[in-house]
Image (cartoon, grey):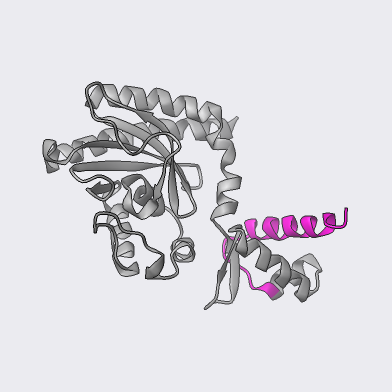
Amino acid sequence: MANAPAAGHALDVLTLLGRHVAPLPASAIARDLGLPRSTVYHLLAVLVDRGFVVHLREERRYGLGSAAYELGSAYARQEPLRWVAQTVLTRLVAQTTHSGHFAVLDGRDVLYLLEERAPGRASLVTEIGVRLPATLTASGLAMLARLPAQQVRALWPSRRDLVRRHDRGPASLTELRRELAETRRRGWAREDGSVTIGFASVAGAVLDHNGHPQGAVALTFPADEVDEDGRERLAAQVLDATARIARHIRGRIAR
């Protein structure tokens, strides 16, 4: 029971941060909650360590972290969403004859929840339950491009935190920002050989009513089999699939 007040105060901090669009300084949190600053700093340190809060050092403010987003949107990844995503993914793979998958963002990684292998296609590394660095995958880039810039900075504060594979993927924070900006401009993400040499992917994010990514749908194909025009056509089909899943999410909220 001794820890119950601390747990309650931690939840109060998260609730307060969730009610504000902009991050808050610790002094404002302490004032609004009627708590000593020392207590607030201790709570914030724990929440930052667990990923529920992001500390913007230059601004001396605190905002919700990726773990808070993950927890707050967890309802959308329960079995009903998984069922809808599987139905949409099955149809997409049948239409395109390329293998597809559905993934969610988990910290710096993507976690693959669904895989639909097209008949006659090779097995891929992106099987159910596999985690890969988000910056290397089309699914990860599609979701990261929809996150606030400060959240991306909190996830990758230094270039040393970036992981490369096959000598591919963003090698610097500048390259990562450029890739995410291009993904936002294009409306979909792509990767070529970053996960598996000889294979490429296109992906789109599934967005909730706040524009926050709940997951991503991707198609993977032999890189030499699909030209640039073909990739754009596949991307359009992927975006149609993500829109159908998103309508289901928003429909659940409306009810």
Residue depicted at x 67% and y 64%: 46
Q: Which residue lies furthest to the right in this view?
A: 1
* In this rendering, position of residue 251 left or right of residue 39: left
Q: Is residue 59 above or below residue 177?
A: below
Image quadrant in which the C terminus is located: top right
Residue depicted at x 35% and y 68%: 173
Point out residue 157 in the picture as x, y percentages from the top left corner.
Answer: 45, 69
Q: In this view, does 128 lie above or below 177?
A: above
* In this rendering, position of residue 71 left or right of residue 43: left
Point out residue 102 in the picture as x, y percentages from the top left corner.
Answer: 40, 35
Q: Does the magenta stretch include residue 249?
A: no
Residue depicted at x 75% and y 71%: 30
The residue segment tinted magenta is 1-26
Residue depicted at x 34% and y 42%: 204
* In this rendering, position of residue 134 left or right of residue 185: right
The image quadrant that residue 236 belongs to is top left
Q: In this view, does 104 lie above or below 115?
A: below
The image quadrant that residue 169 belongs to is bottom left
Numbered-mark total: 0
Point out residue 121 in the picture as x, y percentages from the top left corner.
Answer: 23, 27
Q: In this view, does 210 lie above or below 100?
A: below
Q: Which of 107 and 202 is in front in this view?
A: 107
Examine the residues drawn in magenta and state their main secondary structure.
Answer: helix
Point out residue 185 in the picture as x, y percentages from the top left corner.
Answer: 28, 54
Q: Does the magenta stretch include residue 23?
A: yes
* In this rendering, position of residue 144 left or right of residue 27: left
